[in-house]
Image (cartoon, grey):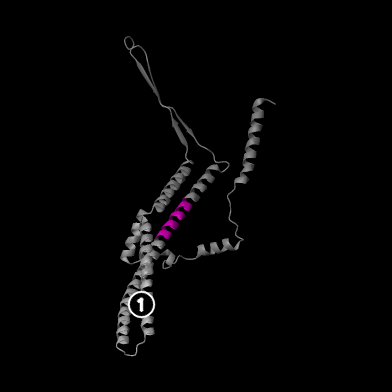
Amino acid sequence: MNFNKFSRIALAVAFATAMGSCGIYTSYKTPESTPMTKAYAEARELPVDSAAFGNLLWEDVFTDPILAGYIREALQNNVNLQNAKLNVDVANANLLGANLSYLPSVALAPTAAIAGNSYIDGTSKTYQIPASVSWEIDIFGKLRNNRKGAKAAVLKSEAYAQAVRSQIIGAVANTYYALTAVKTQLELQRNTAGLWKQTVKTMSDLKEGGRGVTEAAVVQSAANYYSILSSITDLEASVDQLNNTMSLLLN
């Protein structure tokens, strides 16, 4: 057997082996027998409800201008969200690189040379711009898998950025509404404390005037008044804590 014939046989065997091994790198198909995948497929077939709460913009949900300003400031200043956006940019850049890997690569190696004697024959200049083009054949699915991995990384980073964004919006809204509720309760308790203070004074005057008010009634009314004062202190501490939380969210 001569060398050329042996080379052709070896090349044919190698090609057949390579093509046979391609079955290992077939595309993964999600099984359809599990209840979770079936429910997911059915959910994707449903028409999109634009009026659903999850499909609304946060500007349409939170219409309070003060709250909207807080949310915008938090989204603009939050470091975690900025990092998540950078990760999205990096993932998109990697996906672009994976897509460009399907294109042929071109290599240029320009050269220049000068020959001859400048005093006798003059000089001759020569220029060469050799170019080589290479194209990788994706036999084993390497490029395809890299592209799919880069695309999955983009989706993952975008989902993470959206999750961070939703958490920030929800945290700012919860803190704002809690702060509003506590401030309203604090104002009511302060007004109630003023009324109870007048009640204690009135009952004390009635007792001293012998108008049928006992000492026990005066002490009971005073106890209610001081109880309200202690709740005011707790509410003021809650307001300070919520203000600190809002400051952290606004960075």
Q: In the picture shown, does residue 64 fall above or below 86?
A: below
- Image quarter where the C terminus lies is bottom left
Residue drawn at (34%, 74%) of the image? 189
Quarter of the rendering containing residue 169: bottom left
Q: Residue furthest top?
A: 120
Residue 17 x/y as whole percent: 65, 39
Q: In the picture shown, does residue 63 fall above or below 163?
A: below
Q: Look at the image and say whether residue 162 sits in the magenta stretch.
A: yes
The tally of labels here is 1
Q: Which residues are magenta?
A: 154-168
Residue designated by label 1: 225
Q: Which secondary structure class fits the magenta region best?
A: helix
Residue drawn at (49%, 47%) of the image? 150
Q: Inspect the image, locate mark 1, and give the three-letter code of the amino acid beneath it.
A: Tyr
Q: Look at the image and say whether residue 216 sits in the magenta stretch.
A: no
How crowded is the residue under tag 1: few (<14 C-alpha within 10 Å), some, or many (20+)? Answer: many
Residue drawn at (52%, 47%) of the image? 149
